[in-house]
Structure formats: C-alpha cells, structure tokens
Image (spheres, rainbow, N blue to C red):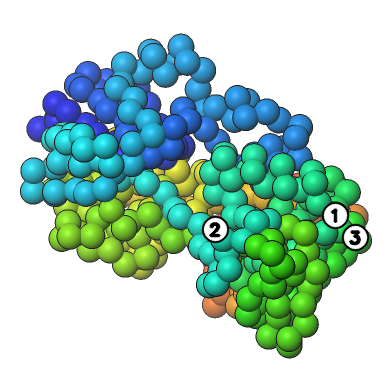
C-alpha cells in the first residue's frame, strides 16, 4: 500500500533526490524533508575544488532554485537534526523536540568527517564535509603559506591540488605509500603521484600521522611516526568519514558500517536508507556494499522511491565516481582496487589521456578513464563479462 506520509531524514543530494523521484513517479502524499544543516540542499563535490578555490560562490552549489523546491510541495525543515528514531511507530524526534511520524522513513543522513585524536580543536585544524567547513577552510588558506593535508584519498588529493593552485606550499601526508592507492592500485597511484609532484605538491607518504604540534592554541605542524614534524600554518584532516548513525542508537536497527539494509535498501518495515549512510546487499555481488559518491546518491534514491511505491526492485549498480585534480579528470567505473590486473587499452599515460581496464580471474571488474570520458564510457560495457580480446584503439 502506498504510504500517505513519507519522511526523508537528511536534506542533501540523496535525500532531495529521493523526494524528487517520489514526486516524479506520481506520489501525491505528504512529503517532509528534514535537514540537520541550516542550508537548502547543496552539492558537495564542488566544495573541495571550486568553492575552496573561490571560483564558485556558495549559492551556486544549491541543488535547486527556491522555486523548484517550492514546486516539490514538500515541507522543508532545516537546521534541526534528528536525534532518535522509533522504527515501530516510524517516529523521528529532532534536536528541537519535534516529533515527526510517517508511514515510510528514509534515512539519508550521510557521513561525519573523521578527526585525529588529540588537539584537533586547535586553531588552523580543519575537516571538509559541509559548506561551512569549506568556507572556513578557504578563509584559513587565504591567510596561510603552508598547508599539510592528512589523508591521501580522493578528498585529500583534491584539497591538495586546489590549495596548490591557490599558491600555497602543500604537503600531502598519509600512511599509504601512494595517493589513492587503495582505490586505484599502484599503476594509477604512481601516475597521480607524478601529477602532484609535477605541480609542486610535496608527498610525505607511507608514514602514519601520530599527532599535531601546537603553540599557544594554534597548530604548527603534523608529527609522523618517524618523529619528523611537517611545518604547517593550516592542517586539513581528510581521513574519511563515518556513517552518521549515532542518532539511531537504541532504535533496534542494525548498524555495521552504515545502516544495514536488504537488497531493496530496506532496513526494517517502512524504513529505508539511501546514500553514504546505507549499507545494502548487492545481489549480483552477493555482498554488502556502501558507496560514498554523488552518482550513487541519485541512483539509489530512484530505487528507494520505486520500492516505497510498491516495486520489488533490487539495487544493483555498477559503481561510478570521478575526481578532478589539476588538469586531470579521472573517472572510475566498477570495482577497481589495488589487487587487480591493470592494462592500458586506449590512449597513452605519457600524453595524459588514457583508459585502463581492471581484471580479476579473467573477468573485467572496472574501467578507469584519465581525461578520456567517452572512451571510458564505451569500455564500461565490458564490466562483468569475460576479459575482452579487443585490440587497444587509437587515442
């Protein structure tokens, strides 16, 4: 039976996409969008790039214009985070004391940025998850000369690249020996390392960060496990995020690296999850999966909307994300990782344009495009089948 009231907890990309998908599919019931931040729904990918660099203003990150939000015919409650969920009655209590009851609840609360233990409250120490985080970091960078980024994943690499284009001295630190090694494997990681060093970023990788040094309440450096201290005026901690599930304590719902869902993105009767916070069963892979990217937020929202409206649709995406660093756009389709066999099948890394195929046990599991978007999309069709025998095409 179609629910008469739907409550979406989380007003970022995944939450908004769920609400829009419901309306687009003909849902005419009561729709409420509850957001913990005071801002209207906005896009996160520009925060570490254009917003941080100052080439885009905060208002340009809004996902929809005010008139489009009004046309959604949804109650938009902002700046009032959820603090408790009763799955039996599908009632959400907020920090202000509101009690919101619905027939279907969609959890879309995203992530919370991880921090380093100790002294993270010192002036000059930042994380980057929200719009306010990005604006605070930009203000700090404009008054700084030396930046240390802790974390060699996608966010850390993007921040390092942006800050370097702003003219700062940038050092990228982290425990793994290469940038984005876990995501892309050694072949592409080495190319990213060359891209960053070629643009003046200092790489201090392969050593754990053990703490920060401070003076009079302000950060002065980052200490490595070698006892070396990397001098810094500003430090960004970009070591990933944890699913924002603390407010679900005591709900009885299962939480394990996100809110655990079945293949329909359903955590319990009438309770769904979408976006970064959702850990669901991927039927084709027969394994749990949780994805932290913008594409998943939209695609999963459509599946959740279908299932709320009575469909029985498993969510079985081919993962996809992209990253912009300096003049390179890297697009990743499928499952890549450090243990795959990697073959360049289009273009040439020496020219800064190529496509690489990732294989395991004779099957194509992923495709990576480096500034070759069209060719990467075409190669995406190979994922899941036997290893192709196609000859590499011309760039």
Question: Which residue is located at x 85 percent, y 67 percent?
Answer: 202
Looking at the picture, does residue 247 appear above or below residue 224? above
Q: Residues within 10 Å of mark 1 (few under 14, many from 20)?
A: some
- 230 left or right, relative to 71: right
- Pick the residue in front: 26 or 107: 107
As measured in the structure, the alpha-carbon distance from the residue carrying label 2 to the one carrying label 1 is: 39 Å
Circle 1: element type: loop
As measured in the structure, the alpha-carbon distance from the residue carrying label 3 to the one carrying label 1 is: 14 Å
Which numbered tag is attached to residue 200? 3
Looking at the picture, does residue 144 appear above or below residue 258? above
Q: Which residue is mark 1?
A: 145
Question: Which residue is located at x 14 percent, y 42 percent?
Answer: 90
- Pick the residue in front: 74 or 292: 74
Circle 2: element type: strand
As measured in the structure, the alpha-carbon distance from the residue carrying label 2 to the one carrying label 3 is: 31 Å
Which one is earlier in the sequence, the residue at label 3 or at label 1?
1
Q: Residues within 10 Å of mark 3 (few under 14, many from 20)?
A: some
Residue 230 in the image: state x and y as whole percent: 79, 73
Query: Can residue 323 be seen here?
Result: yes
Residue 71 in the image: state x and y as whole percent: 38, 13
Question: Which residue is located at x 36 percent, y 18 percent?
Answer: 72
- 256 left or right, relative to 49: left
Query: Can residue 178 be seen here?
Result: no
Q: Nearer the viewer, mark 2 or mark 1?
A: 1
- Pick the residue in front: 365 or 57: 57
- 178 left or right, relative to 35: right
Residue 10 in the image: state x and y as whole percent: 36, 40
Q: Nearer the viewer, mark 3 or mark 1?
A: 1
Q: Nearer the viewer, mark 2 or mark 3?
A: 3
Circle 3: element type: loop
Q: Are marks 2 and 1 in contact (CB under 8 Å)?
A: no
Which one is earlier in the sequence, the residue at label 2 or at label 1?
1
């Amino acid at each position: 039976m179609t629910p008469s009231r739907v409550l979406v907890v989380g007003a970022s990309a995944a939450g908004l996409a769920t609400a829009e998908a419901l309306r687009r599919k003909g849902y005419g019931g009561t729709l409420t969008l509850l957001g913990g931040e005071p801002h209207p729904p906005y896009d996160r990918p520009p925060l570490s790039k254009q917003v941080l660099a100052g080439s885009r203003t905060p208002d340009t990150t809004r996902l929809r214009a005010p008139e489009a939000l009004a046309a959604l015919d949804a109650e938009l409650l902002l700046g009032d985070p959820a603090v408790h969920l009763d799955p039996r009655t599908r009632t959400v209590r907020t920090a202000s004391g509101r009690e919101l009851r619905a027939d279907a609840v969609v959890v879309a609360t995203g992530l919370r940025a991880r921090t380093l233990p100790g002294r993270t409250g010192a002036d000059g120490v930042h994380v980057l998850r929200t719009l306010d985080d990005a604006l605070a970091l930009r203000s700090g960078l404009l008054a700084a000369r030396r930046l240390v980024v802790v974390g060699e994943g996608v966010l850390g690499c993007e921040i390092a690249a942006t800050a370097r284009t702003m003219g700062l001295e940038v050092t990228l630190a982290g425990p793994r020996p290469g940038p984005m090694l876990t995501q892309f494997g050694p072949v592409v990681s080495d190319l990213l390392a060359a891209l960053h060093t070629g643009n003046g970023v200092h790489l201090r990788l392969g050593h754990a960060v053990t703490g920060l040094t401070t003076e009079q309440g302000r950060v002065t450096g980052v200490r490595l496990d070698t006892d070396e201290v990397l001098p810094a005026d500003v430090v960004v901690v970009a070591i990933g995020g944890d699913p924002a599930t603390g407010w679900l304590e005591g709900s009885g719902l299962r939480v394990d690296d996100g809110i655990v869902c079945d293949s329909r993105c359903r955590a319990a009767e009438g309770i769904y999850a979408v976006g970064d916070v959702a850990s669901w069963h991927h039927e084709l892979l027969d394994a749990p999966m949780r994805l932290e990217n913008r594409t998943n937020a939209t695609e999963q929202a459509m599946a959740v909307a279908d299932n709320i409206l009575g469909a029985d649709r498993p969510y079985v995406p081919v993962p996809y994300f992209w990253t912009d660093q300096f003049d390179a756009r890297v697009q990743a389709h499928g499952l890549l990782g450090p243990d795959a066999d990697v073959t360049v099948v289009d273009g040439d890394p020496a020219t800064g344009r190529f496509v690489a195929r990732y294989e395991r046990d004779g099957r194509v599991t992923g495709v990576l495009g480096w500034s070759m978007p069209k060719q990467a999309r075409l190669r995406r069709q190979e994922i899941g089948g036997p290893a192709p025998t196609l000859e590499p095409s011309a760039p």
